[in-house]
Amino acid sequence: MANTTTSVAPARTQKAPEAGALVARRKRRYTLLTRHDKILIALMVGVPLTLDLVLIWGPTIASVVLSFTNWSGIGPITDKNFIGFKNYQFMFTGYTLFWPAFMHNLIWLAWLTFIATPLGMFFAVLLDREMRGTRIYQSVFFLPVVLSLVVVGFIWELQYAPTEGFINNAFGLVKSGKLIDWLGNPRINLFAILVATSWRHIGYIMILYLAGLKSVDPSLREAARVDGATEVQTFFSVILPVMAPINVIIVVVTAIEALRAFDIAFIINQGKNGLELLSILITNNSISEASLVGFGSAIAVILLLISIGPIVLFLSRTMRTLA
Amino acid sequence: MSVIAATTARPLVRRAQRRIRPARVILQAFLIAMVVVWLFPLFWAIYASLRPYSDTVQHGYLSWPANGLSFINYQNVWTQGEIPYYYLNTLVIVVPGVILTLLLASMVAFCCTQFSWRFNLIVLMLFTAGNLLPPQVIIVPLYWIYLHTPIPMLGSIDIGTKFSFAIFSDNNLLYDQYIGIILIHVVFQTGFATFVLSNYMKTITKEITESALVDGANVLRIWWSVVLPLCRPALAAMATLLFTFMYNDFFWALILLSHGDKRPITTALNNLQGEFLINNNLIAAGALLACLPPIIVYILLQKHFVAGLTLGSTKG
Amino acid sequence: MGDSREAKRVQNFLALQDEALRLNPHLTRRDVLKIAGYGSLAAFIAACGGGATNTPTGITATGGTMSLGSYNTDPGSKAGTQAIVDAFTAANGGTKVKLNTVDHGTFQNTISQYLQGTPEDAFTWFSGHRMRFFAAKGLATPIDDVWSAVKSNYTSGFEASIKGNDGKAYAIPTDYYPWAVFYRKDVWAAKGYSVPKNWDDFKALCAKMKSDGLIPIAFADKDGWPAQGTFDILNLRLNGYDFHVNLLTGQNGQKWTDPKVTAVFKKWSEITQYYSPAFAGLTWEQGADQLLRKQAGMYLLGLFVSDEFKASGSQADVDQLDFFAFPHVGSSFDAEEALDAPIDVYMLTAKSPTLQNDLGQAKAFLEFVSKGSTQVTYWKNAPGSIPTANDADTSQYPALTKKAVQIVSGAKKITQYFDRDSRPDFAGPNGMQGFLLKFLSNPSQDTTNLQKDMQNFWDSLPPE
């Protein structure tokens, strides 16, 4: 689950009126920090930073380096292992599964962007009013978010199983022999698990968006109502533009979720036969019996490059509020 | 009735409500329908878990169990599937993980927001971005690091006959150790936690820190005694979220633990499926037991959950 | 008992004790003895005097500890493994065995990490290329000494399956099972079916079953590997053993684009219409259930289908199980009577941190599982796994098992199964498993491009 949040409050500029005085104070404050303090600060930041660099950014760079090798993960890496761009060549031109997996990630992204996220926003808009039971509705829609994707996968397998699942049995398909193979038919299984993922994704987006809606100045809505705008008009012409920063966050969260998709496809059938995704290909190539570490790393680099877009977007938007 | 409740609200709104009441009814109806649709898969799983497998075999999946509902699946999965044991594994990983993450993240957030120095922003960016990466991008080199980092073997804490928490390793490596999993969780989630806590701490004026410095406190003291207590709502919110994220993790434990009996419950569900073949009723019981703690946490601490996700607007 | 041996054993044990005390300074010598299962040093020596020695070769050790990694999580095989472990502890002077059970799928998928990390001393695995692949990477310990001690208990056919590329022995075979076409005797008797003698008979039988309302051939390929069984047997029948082996290992320049491979797919497409509906969403256990519940007429699977019959059904159901060899297809290779008969083995890891200390006990374990009596203990829990040892007590075998032994011994050529005869990186979920699923999603397709993809994938793999 993408661990992102909205920074909903407009930047509290309590410091603005005191800018001049603060500069003077800042200068003074630096002398308040003893040497001891500076060391402490260095440690307080340095230790987590080192861990972050060693365990996350270091391996990221290592993955990039490994993508130029054909190392099997066992034993030392020698000069012989470096094969230049051959992994990339094979991946783009020869590997049957790469483009389908890429397509599946794109389909995942499109589904989340055009169906799941809008539905989440829609629910948020519906619930953003004084109405009985809105707390209960929120709780219900958000409930799947606290379930792990593994549990979500199991729950939906009970629905989708060809001979024992609810759907095929409830609609009489088992009896009439016209089974729909929800999870085994490569043409539809991706959409089947997208429905399961949306079950979770919609609640997540709903909460994020709801918080954003609640922070919209009520007087804007009042003004629109006084002017006679309908709810729909109010939403699209007044509220949506004001929520621009939130919208960006929502878009980024959606994109990152789409790129991180892994758990549910993996536990359904290990990510084959229509459920291939880039993250699955990485895992099945480098950390499975196959041990094709170099090749897997090349796919990882592609996933990394694609992820950089949304990450940079997120950073540029949110760092503004922090700077 | 909503009208009575609205009499205390602005009169303009009340008139609006009266005008659109039929629409409100439709809305409620729609929402109730959606609630049913939303909860159905979960209810179906609960229903499946309350039927014995033999009954399903005989009468199919769509019938009411012949002998009524029973908890036998829960009993079986609790004992055969050794669920309490996996709960313990999860607890041992998640609780230290949450605490450590909050400690580290609040430290970084504190330093980056209360003091300005040159690389402030870059550090924050590194942390935040690190958490947005898909884990598969870093898993192979990470695995190699885990296999080659020496960790001292200083004994262990044993509970009962099966559970053993090694201090800090039982094979001199980071691999296949509880602390290894705790470590990667902490490092991975610190990014998100730092970001949220930074957002929150930005609203604490630097004067508070300044005056504490003037009073002669060192930064560590200020962090612990002054700033952290002010961040209690944010910390509570983060704790709820972090608990859920770490509890629901599947991937790290799958790759970085090789012993089946050290795995936390989310990853151990796979083991259950292998063991009980196609007894869907039993597996449903196992899955529901697995997701019970986060649901309980959510129901009890819903406020914090939502606050954590939307931080910035709840400081009051 | 020779005094020198006893003295050596005591010496070994004391050395182990010293090591244990060094690592755990809070223990006393008595504690260490207790841990090893003895009340005192005197008791240990007494046990030496009266205890059983396993072999005359001195490579094994009693008492102490060892660890075992196992993928046997199915109820029958899990109980069987526990039974073996308990029997070993009793027979080997109280050796404490630490058992690490991981579900079958995860164990296989993470085997590379497992073996490189901190594995147990011994582990369950498969023979064939799949074993050689990891042995060649130095992740298994050669056990020539153990093999020479036990090889008299095996027919020569097993020797080839446990040798690595360097000619050293790496594994002890413990059980095997043939792949054949299974059916229920009662269903066939009721409907008047008889065993088909050739391909045309087989198709006719399928058609008859379909009109009788049965699923003619149960098929379940969610896991990806079951389909490889059908590929194997068709390829063996049509093109012969040598072609098959060359194809799976890329030897002698054999390519997947060969028209002989196309012929296999063509033949296969003649029976796919008789498969279970939605087979790509069914696991093999669900396929077996279709046979068990009289919904399907036949099932091409390994003998382990009887394990599922036992787990989900009753002994009466197991007694109704019967099989026939895959029918002849009318080629010159029918005479080879070839079939898949995979062999399961136990091996020693190379990187276990405790292996140096436990080497004697680990080798004792391997010797123990090579005995017929041990294998029969396992078989009693998992009737689909036929013991490999010569001295196994076959008098207890029911008719089904005897028939299985016969069909394997009557075969002139035996293969290990696709994913054990070929490279694991080629045969896996994003390799051949995926390709076969692609074929099965549209069996009547022109497979030229698919075969090109298979060959490209093979060519892309790094040298072994």
Image (tube, coloured by chain):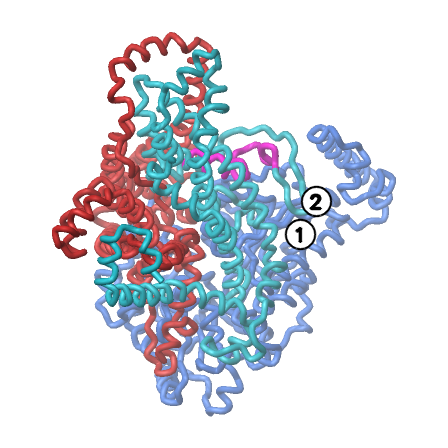
* Number of numbered callouts drawn: 2
Which residue is identified by label 2?
A: C60
Give the residue displayed 50% in from the left and 63% down from the top: B284
On screen, C126 above or below C213?
A: above
* Highlighted magenta segment, given as a residue range: B166-188
Looking at the image, can residue A108 be seen?
Answer: no
On screen, C446 above or below B68?
A: above
Find the residue positioned furthest to the left.
A227
Asked which secondary structure carries label 1, the reply is helix
Asked which secondary structure carries label 2, the reply is loop
Q: Residue A320's mark?
A: none
Camera-nearest residue between C203 and C330: C203
Query: Residue A15 colored magenta?
Result: no
Q: Are marks 1 and 2 in contact (CB under 8 Å)?
A: yes
Q: Which chain is blue?
A: C
Name the chain letter of the residue that bears numbered label 2: C
Camera-nearest residue between C246 and A200: A200
Give the residue displayed 27% in from the left and 50% down from the top: B10
Give the residue displayed 49% in from the left and 74% down from the top: C289
Residue B199 drawn at (x, y percent): 34, 32
Mark 2, Cα crowd under 10 Å, few <14 / some 14-19 / many 20+, is many
Q: Which chain is red?
A: A
Q: Amino acid at mark 1?
A: Glu
| Quarter of the figure that contains the C terminus of chain A | top left
Q: Amino acid at mark 2?
A: Thr
Q: Splitting the image into 4 quarters, where does residue C120 fall?
A: top right
Q: Earlier in the sequence, mark 1 or mark 2?
A: 2
Which residue is identified by label 1?
A: C367
Camera-nearest residue between B238 and A307: B238
Separation of marks 1 and 2 at Cα, in angstroms: 9 Å
Q: Colour of chain B?
A: cyan
Camera-nearest residue between C187 and A213: A213
